[in-house]
Image: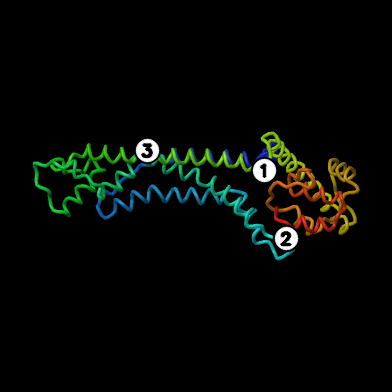
Amino acid sequence: MDKFRMMFQFLQANQESFMNGFCGIMALASAQLYSSFKFTCPCLPEYNLAYGIGILLVPALWFFILGFVLNNNISMVTEEWMRPPGARRKEPRVLRYMLSSMTQRALIAPSVWIAVGLMHGETLLCACSTVADLRRFYNRSHAAPPERELARLLARIPCENVFDGHMLISREAASRYIRGMSQLLGWLMIAVISLGVFLMLCLKRCCSPLGYQQEAYWSSYRANEHVFFQRTADAHAKIHAAETVKSFFGFVALDKEEKELLAGCQGGKNVIPSKEWNRITGVYLYRENKGAPLYSRLNKWSNYTKDDDHEAIEKEMDMLC
């Protein structure tokens, strides 16, 4: 049980790395799911387009929504925006930054699904068999059939077993043409996404107020602060619960470790006001106080509390970031 708890704390502390890894796993899962998915085109002129586009976009939409649902930051942003009325001001730029970050991660798996679908070519072949201009592949020695019959034959191009128009159109050539266009779109999509990621990373580095070493230190600080905070909060909650039970029964049954914990944590705060919890909770962007870096809301609270500047505490801690 302790190993599972340590693993959970590690994942929480390294949330950014964990989310990046999770997005990568979702992307691989989407590619594997597509590979194992048996694509069956209806081969009917009324349904080919809707089915092909739907298979390409509906699972991608599901992956996109799942990326938001499984992102821990969405609850933080929602809680921050719906926070009860108080002195803390809401900064739209911070919320926009958080939503942008979550959206970027949520788009990874859908992009992989669509790119893999385009590279395979089956979905676009099904969707475009009835709408693409395939006249160049017609057999000129035969008269063109009525429009309704022609639509039926074109809709059967993705289905080799039921296609019966070999005398009128070269199915192999038409299929290769549509698959080639599909793969071209897939490579263009990959190139655009790669260029977009490169530009965003460059923009992030150009707009960051910190050097890469300080950013690494900031990441390490947040991870360690989270571990220490969770460990201390668990101990404080246990001591608070023990004192509450003791006030009711007149005594509390503790094991040896709990007695040592209770003896070693004398002098701590009995109750932490909700206002203080509110001040250290929420999203945060990097700030400084007189040149001193503030790496978290808790670090910011500690810095201003040490100075005993109540006016600055009221002003600064009520800011979203």
Q: Which residue is mark 1?
A: 12
Q: Position of residue 214 (x, y in %)?
A: 71, 36
Q: Is residue 31 above or below residue 62?
A: above
- At mark 1, the secondary structure is helix
Q: Position of residue 240 (x, y in %)?
A: 83, 53
**3D distance between C-alphas at marks 3 and 1:** 36 Å
- Residue at image position (46%, 43%) is 111
* Type of amino acid under label 1: Gln
Neighbours of disc 2 within 10 Å: few (<14), some (14-19), many (20+): some
- At mark 2, the secondary structure is loop
Q: Which residue is mark 2?
A: 88
**Viewport quadrant of the N terminus:** top right
**3D distance between C-alphas at marks 2 and 3:** 50 Å
Q: Earlier in the sequence, mark 1 or mark 2?
A: 1
Compared across the picture, whether 152 is left or right of 57 comes to left
Q: Earlier in the sequence, mark 2 or mark 3?
A: 2
